[in-house]
């Protein structure tokens, strides 16, 4: 068990370290675990907590708090975000001291009501609202969808510290508390952005605008090392990675193909000709040549997506489903798509992929196109028309 740390006078890290965690949330592999960062601010008149920890660390968290202040003296807990890795100890804390007031956003309050059966005193904050702790102040900056609708940041102006919730964090548990005390974790920092924050680029741009001009001596995220040297570097990274893609004069179509026998790629050649006839720019890849990061980059550069898939054993093959699994992890410029492909025995894949795209809120202006085995010359004419019609639909 780690001990608390006074990161500034009367400002304490009271979080938990989880270095043996191999997969965060059973979704994201980690090299050496993560941390659940939580903080205590002891003002001259009031004592505030900022977030709690994952439930399995509740006793450790309460023990850390009690070594600093009696639990009965705590006035408020700021819930920057209600996900259980940050509210896991809240129920027990409020059982011990039900007078603690929970400060959160309106969506946060709604989620808390659904997550906890016990009554709790809540205070819903507004953008820029401040609360005085005596000689310290907490200011609340709403940051919806970084990465849940409930999310907010808390700023401590007297120390120029931003408690940034999940934003600017990383699933990385180093030997030290601060970034400058641990080995390089830039891979984890970027991976965390790509897998957790990337679907919300517009919201990231809004949140970055709120903090990029704040006087900052430290960013204290909810996961990973604290950033006390050049904290704005993390903000600049998010600003760069979330930048809006430049608008081109021509519509850009990304075409991803999988073609074990060459027939679907044969169709793709005519579809591409039709796209280009109609004035679109086309970027074409064989699905297997792209890693996940490249797929995400290409998805965000294009205005529309064409998937060319065969049918194998009545289904689209796994590499196609891998592509589909990545669509919800990006901020695409446009959600317009179409599907085509060749088949041998049966042709379910095109319909199955269309259903998946519709489920992800993609618009499909054309009905999918499929032909059996090697497309005929007549089929190829249809493919070319399919490409041209797709661009016309895009332009509307
Ligand atoms: Fe670290 Fe969104 O919870």
Image (tube, rainbow, N blue to C red):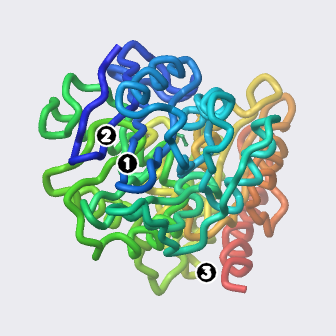
Count the numbered circles shown.
3
On the image, the x and y values in percent for residue 6 come to 24, 38
Would you name the residue on which mark 3 appears?
278
Badge 1, how many Cα within 10 Å: few under 14, some, many 20+? many
Which of these two is toward me, 133 or 88?
Answer: 133
Q: Nearer the viewer, mark 3 or mark 2?
A: 2
Given contact means CB atoms under 8 Å apart, are the residues at marks 3 and 1 in contact? Answer: no
Locate the N terminus and report the quarter of the image it occupies: top left
Q: Is mark 2 within 8 Å of ligand 1?
A: no
Q: Relative to 394, is 176 above or below?
A: above
Q: Distance between the Cα atoms at labels 1 and 2?
A: 6 Å
SS assignment at label 3: loop
Badge 3, how many Cα within 10 Å: few under 14, some, many 20+? some
Would you name the residue on which mark 2 appears?
12
For image coordinates 63% across by 40% down, the residue present is: 325
| Residue 318 as seen in the image, left or right of residue 132 | right
| Residue 83 as seen in the image, left or right of residue 311 | left
Would residue 376 be visible to someone looking at this image? no
The circle on residue 354 is: none
Would you name the residue on which mark 1 appears?
41
Which of these two is toward me, 268 or 139?
Answer: 139
Q: Is mark 3 within 8 Å of ligand 1?
A: no
């Amino acid at each position: 068990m780690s001990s608390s740390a006074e990161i500034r006078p009367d400002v304490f890290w009271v979080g938990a370290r989880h270095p043996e965690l191999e997969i965060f949330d059973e979704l994201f592999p980690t090299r050496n675990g993560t941390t659940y960062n939580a903080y205590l601010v002891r003002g001259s008149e009031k004592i505030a907590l900022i977030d709690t920890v994952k439930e399995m660390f509740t006793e450790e968290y309460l023990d850390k708090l009690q070594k600093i202040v009696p639990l009965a003296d705590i006035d408020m807990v700021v819930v920057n975000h209600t996900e259980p890795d940050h509210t896991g100890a809240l129920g027990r804390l409020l059982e011990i001291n039900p007078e603690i007031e929970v400060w959160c956003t309106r969506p946060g309050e709604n989620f808390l009501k659904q997550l906890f059966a016990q009554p709790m005193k809540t205070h819903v904050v507004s953008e820029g609202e401040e609360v005085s702790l005596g000689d310290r102040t907490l200011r609340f900056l709403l940051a919806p969808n970084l990465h849940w609708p409930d999310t907010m940041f808390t700023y401590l102006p007297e120390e120029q510290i931003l408690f940034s919730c999940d934003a600017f964090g990383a699933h990385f548990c180093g030997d030290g508390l601060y970034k400058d005390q641990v080995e390089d974790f830039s891979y984890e920092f970027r991976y965390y952005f790509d897998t957790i924050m990337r679907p919300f680029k517009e919201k990231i741009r809004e949140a970055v605008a709120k903090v990029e001009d704040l006087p900052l001596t430290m960013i204290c995220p909810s996961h990973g090392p604290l950033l006390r040297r050049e904290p704005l570097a993390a903000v600049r990274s998010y600003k760069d990675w979330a930048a809006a893609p430049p608008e081109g004069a021509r519509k850009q179509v990304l075409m991803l193909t999988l073609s074990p026998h060459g027939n679907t790629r044969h169709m793709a050649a005519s579809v591409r000709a039709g796209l280009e006839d109609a004035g679109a720019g086309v970027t074409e890849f064989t699905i297997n040549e792209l890693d996940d990061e490249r797929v995400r980059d290409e998805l965000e550069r294009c205005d529309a997506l064409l998937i060319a898939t065969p049918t194998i054993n009545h289904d689209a093959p796994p590499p196609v489903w891998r592509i589909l699994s990545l669509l919800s992890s990006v901020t695409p410029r446009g959600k317009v798509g179409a599907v085509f492909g060749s088949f041998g025995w049966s042709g379910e894949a095109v319909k199955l992929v269309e259903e998946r795209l519709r489920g992800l809120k993609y618009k499909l202006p054309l009905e999918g196109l499929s032909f059996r085995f090697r497309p005929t010359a007549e089929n190829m004419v249809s493919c070319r028309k399919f490409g041209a019609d797709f661009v016309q639909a895009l332009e509307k």
